[in-house]
Amino acid sequence: MTQETPTPSRREQILQGLALMLEEDSGKRITVAALARQVGVSEAALYRHFPSKARMFEGLIAFIEESLFERIGRILDEVPEAVPRCGQILTLVLAFAEKNPGLSRLLGGDALTGETARLRLRIHQLFERLETQLKQVLREAELREGRRPTLPVSAAANLMLAQLEGQISRYVRSDFRHRPTEYWDDQWALLSAQLLREVPQTA
């Protein structure tokens, strides 16, 4: 007996429609009227589920946060060493952006041009949270492994985050032709080789 795929709720259909428009209409500002046509409902029906377009964007951002940080939690539970932890966290975000081109436009920020500042703050906070998590992993390396970053912790975490954001930005700028993971294995091999050093033993 086959298991049927659950039919998405109207709210989910609206968010899926918005994500698809972000992917297909790259660079265009999305209107509620256009989104209503995409989903196949009236504008009034959209507003019954979301009081504003900003709330629709917030729904997508919340989905990104939940998806990423739930999986990051599993990485932290399953991977004990700092360098593989950082590598898997960064790879997760890059792969998520690659598989969800419309959402990568939110992560890159360009889809929020002209939208409320609250949305840009949410994306800023998401990346701040990622950077804080990377800092925590690096700080724990000295206690767990007797190793510390070759750069100050804040600088090392910022370097990794800058690489992450740069790849996502390039992906969006190229209209999704240049994949964020395209050169990632080689780039991470270079970065990770210099990331930590042994803590000198005191006499």
Image (tube, rainbow, N blue to C red):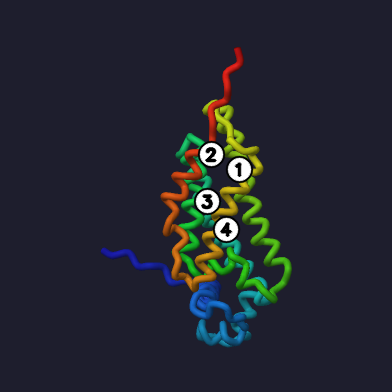
Instruction: Pick the residue in front: 203 or 66.
Output: 203
Q: Are marks 2 and 1 in contact (CB under 8 Å)?
A: yes
Q: Secondary structure at mark 1?
A: helix
Amino acid type shown at disc 2: Leu
**Sequence order check: which comes first, mark 2 or mark 1?**
1
- Furthest toward the left, the residue is 1
Instruction: Answer few, some or many: residues within 10 Å of disc 3's Cα (few below 14, many 20 plus, some between 14 and 19).
Output: few
- Cα distance in 3D space between marks 3 and 2: 25 Å
Secondary structure at badge 2 equals loop
* SS of the residue under disc 4: helix
Label 4: how many residues lie within 10 Å, few (<14), some (14-19) or many (20+)?
some
- Per the model, the C-alpha gap separating discs 1 and 3 is 24 Å
Of the residues tagged 4 and 3, which is closer to the observer? 4
Q: Earlier in the sequence, mark 1 or mark 3?
A: 3
Residue where numbered disc 2 is placed: 195
* Tags 1 and 3 touching, CB below 8 Å: no
Q: Nearer the viewer, mark 3 or mark 2?
A: 2
The structure residue drawn at horizontal position 51% and vertical position 82%, both measured from the top left corner, is 39
Question: According to the image, label 1 marks what residue?
Answer: 156
| Residue 44 picture location, percent across and down | 63, 85
Query: How far apart in space, not on screen, are marks 2 and 4 (Cα)?
Result: 18 Å
**Label 3 with label 2: CB-CB less than 8 Å:** no
Using the rendered image of the protein, determine whether residue 10 is visible from the camera's viewpoint.
no
Q: Position of residue 49 (x, y in %)?
A: 61, 75
Residue at image mark 4 = 165
Q: Which mark, residue 139?
A: none
Query: Which residue is label 3 attached to?
Result: 70
Is 114 rendered above or below residue 128?
A: below
Q: Position of residue 149 (x, y in %)?
A: 58, 35
Inspect this view and state whether residue 197 appears: yes
